[in-house]
């Protein structure tokens, strides 16, 4: 009220979601249909969409100094861009299209501790008859899940944070490519309570040339 009376401008600004490769919150992109047609028979996903609308953007700052950007779409998917050493296209080291496979609520603290202790990180992970090998191995017999915090920007201006405990797996495909599996225990404070879940996603490599920006 006083700012209006005395002409003081409201300097509060909605945080801006990060952008890369022409990808931005509210924008859209297309994956080369031929790329999808060739690789999908080897994957556990079905009927992947070629056209995607970006409905939210996630940002993770890694301890190594790198960054992960995730562009969540209307097809229960997210395009993930990994950067190292900077935030330009020259710093991109990996691009994958991920699809959510399964999300399960964690109902007790005992279940959560079991996930963190041994269920998220295993030497081998089996899904739909396929065996995936752990990628992030530590020295010794124990390779704990990697902890990270994702800041998520939504179209309505809401910004939230989720703590994640993650392990990456891969299996080789017949075409010398790989299918990746991301197993993540996720924890978010909602009101006075911790909302916890186990999220499994499957993904595959995408070349920048496979992506077309709409508009």
Image (spheres, rainbow, N blue to C red):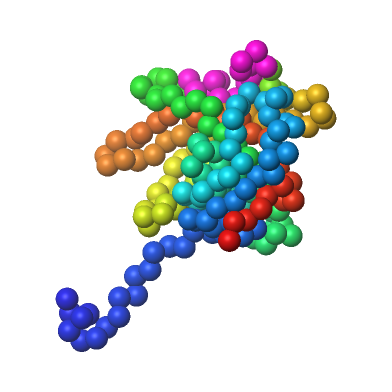
Residue at (65% x, 58% y) in the render = 21
Question: Measured along the vertical axis of the image, is residue 32 above or below residue 23?
Answer: above
Picture coordinates of residue 155 (x, y %)? 41, 54
Magenta stretch, residue numbers: 114-130
Question: Measured along the vertical axis of the image, is residue 98 above or below residue 7?
Answer: above
Question: Measured along the vertical axis of the image, is residue 147 above or below residue 169?
Answer: below
Residue, far bottom: 6
Residue at (34% x, 70% y) in the render = 12
Picture coordinates of residue 29 (x, y %)? 59, 51
Front residue of this view, candidates 73 and 184: 73
Q: How many marks?
A: 0
Residue at (30% x, 76% y) in the render = 10
Q: Is residue 152 left or right of residue 107?
A: right
Q: Is residue 81 left or right of residue 27?
A: right
Picture coordinates of residue 202 (x, y %)? 61, 30
Front residue of this view, candidates 36 and 172: 36
Q: Is residue 51 left or right of residue 150?
A: right
Q: Is residue 197 magenta?
A: no
Q: Is residue 123 magenta?
A: yes
């Amino acid at each position: 009220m006083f700012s209006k009376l005395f002409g003081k401008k409201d300097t509060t600004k909605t945080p801006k979601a990060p952008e890369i490769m022409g990808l931005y919150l509210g924008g859209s992109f297309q994956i080369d249909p031929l790329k999808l047609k060739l690789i999908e028979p080897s994957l556990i996903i079905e009927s992947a969409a070629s056209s995607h609308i970006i409905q939210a953007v996630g940002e993770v700052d890694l301890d190594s100094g790198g960054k992960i950007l995730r562009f969540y779409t209307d097809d229960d998917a997210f395009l993930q861009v990994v950067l190292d050493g900077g935030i330009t296209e020259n710093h991109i080291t990996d691009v994958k299209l991920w699809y959510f496979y399964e999300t399960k609520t964690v109902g007790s603290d005992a279940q959560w501790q079991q996930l963190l202790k041994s269920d998220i990180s295993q030497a081998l992970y089996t899904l739909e008859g396929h065996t995936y090998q752990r990628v992030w191995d530590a020295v010794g017999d124990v390779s704990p899940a990697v902890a990270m915090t994702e800041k998520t920007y939504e179209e309505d201006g809401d910004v939230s944070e989720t703590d994640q405990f993650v392990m990456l797996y891969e299996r080789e495909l017949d075409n010398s490519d790989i299918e990746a599996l991301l197993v993540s225990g996720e924890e978010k404070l909602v009101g006075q309570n911790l909302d916890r879940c186990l999220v499994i996603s499957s993904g595959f490599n995408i070349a920048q040339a496979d992506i077309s920006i709409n508009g």
